[in-house]
Amino acid sequence: MTNELQAFIPDDLDRKLFAVFPGLVMRKDLAQATRGTSKAPSYVVEFMLGKYCANLFDDEDVREGLQIVQQEIADYIPRGDETELIKTAIRERPPRRIIDLVKVELDERLEEGVYWASLMTANIRHVHITPQIFEQYERLLLSGVWCNILIAYDDSRRYRNRTYPFVIQRLEPVQVGHVDLAEYGAGRAQFSRDEWINVLIRTMGYEPDHPALTERVKLLYLLRLVPLVESNYHLIELGPRQTGKSFCFTEFSPYGTLLAGGAVTVPKLFVSNTSPPRAGLIAQRDVVGFDEIAGSAFDSDHDKNLYKSYMENGQVNRGTITVPGDAGFVFNGNINFDPRHSPQAEHLFKPLPASVSDDTAFHDRWAAYLPGWELPKLTPELLTSHVGFILDYTSEVFHRELRRIGHYGTLWEQWFEAPAGEWSARDRRSINRTFSGLTKLIFPAGTMEKHEAEPLLRLAIEMRLRIRCQLHTMSPREFPLTRFSYDDREAGRNVVVELADG
């Protein structure tokens, strides 16, 4: 595959990004060259590429580094069907090196209080690991971490007359260990607004100079990232297949998860009734994506009410237990028509499962409806061969730093205000959250000019307006169709926001 790489011709943005963030960026065409060769997500592979292909402007060094990464993937990242081969290799030729997603949990049922590691891709459970090895990596006890590990075999390890022979001797995360918001912000300050948007678009793997990527399309791409930087942000996107709807939850960040087909149990998502109770994905992830939601179902009104309660309050009550969570919900679904030209449904929520498609209270809780039909289908020409951030770096910045920043949702009020009585409380909250998330992505320091804030405000209003228009179609009395606008105090004018797609 290395022979397929074309000569790299850097542009000014490539050179600038490499100079400002050395060691934290990579050529995105390298990720394409390794895609599909392992079960490791892109953020892990990109970390390895960033390590071995650090000299971005020397094609020969890059080819050698890519060859090393491809060999590492082939030799050390297991496939799911290799479990018994790996166990045998550990026993016969210890120690064995593996690169895998490692999760650790305490088995309090044993008097010794044993910690077990699970190798998720190799599908090997009950692997011994000591606190001295994992105590500096808290994420091992949460969502897990992809690690370079060395495993030995010791059949003297017995508990309750059972042998547990696999032992982790050494562990090193294959992910970025430290990020600094001040350094990130200082680097951002050296780019213009448009340059920074293009950096983020290239980080996602797309080429911002492609004719299909208009200013609006770029902002819609960034809207997909808002749930990763804004807590309890709930987004729905319906659109054609092959537009990259699930990328942010499967490849972009370890803090997102995708539930294929939308199927998940209440205990797994919210809280289990075990003793002690265990919080589900809402407390373990930043965002939970529900893929192909149009083909799923909600089993009962009780389950549906749990969703509505959580989406409204950021917590659920189950019995006597109250469980808070920060995760946002994102519903993704495929529709085979373009609402701009050929409406084929009563309203734009109709393709969802019958149990929720006509539930106005459910849909009133969305912060935004992203019009997926406006985004181009993925083609080779749409993918960038230029430089962007290593995904694991941005995912850590988003999770550890931007997500914790105070809410930026009211910064637009320096210049604009909502007309009295026009927005409901949910409208304002939704618009503020969308504006806050886009601001964190584009202006992480929270500093912007009026002309820079206005496009973000207009988009935030429009994404909420689409929801209100559909609610009006579903229940005109409950949701009278009021126009959405904002007042420009300096200019003394009222600006009406309309749906770009009619």
Image (spheres, helix red, strand yellow):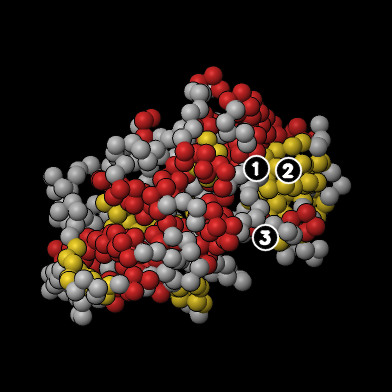
Visible residue check, residue 197: no
Question: Percent position (x, y) of residue 336?
Answer: 23, 42
Question: Percent position (x, y) of residue 84?
Answer: 68, 34
Locate residue 216 relative to residue 53 in the image: left or right: left
The dot on residue 149 is 2
- The answer to which image quadrant residue 375 occupies is top left
Mark positioned earlier in the residue sequence (1 or 2) = 1
Under mark 3, the amino acid is Glu
The dot on residue 100 is 1
Q: Which residue is mark 3?
A: 138
Asked whether 118 or 100 is in front, the reply is 100
Under mark 2, the amino acid is Ile
Question: Percent position (x, y) of residue 294?
Answer: 30, 50
Under mark 1, the amino acid is Asp
Residue that appears at 56% across and 22% down = 2
CA separation in Å, label 3 and label 1: 17 Å
Q: Is residue 305 above or below residue 18?
A: below
Residue that appears at 54% across and 22% down = 1
Residue at disc 2, secondary structure: strand
Locate residue 205 relative to residue 368 in the image: left or right: right
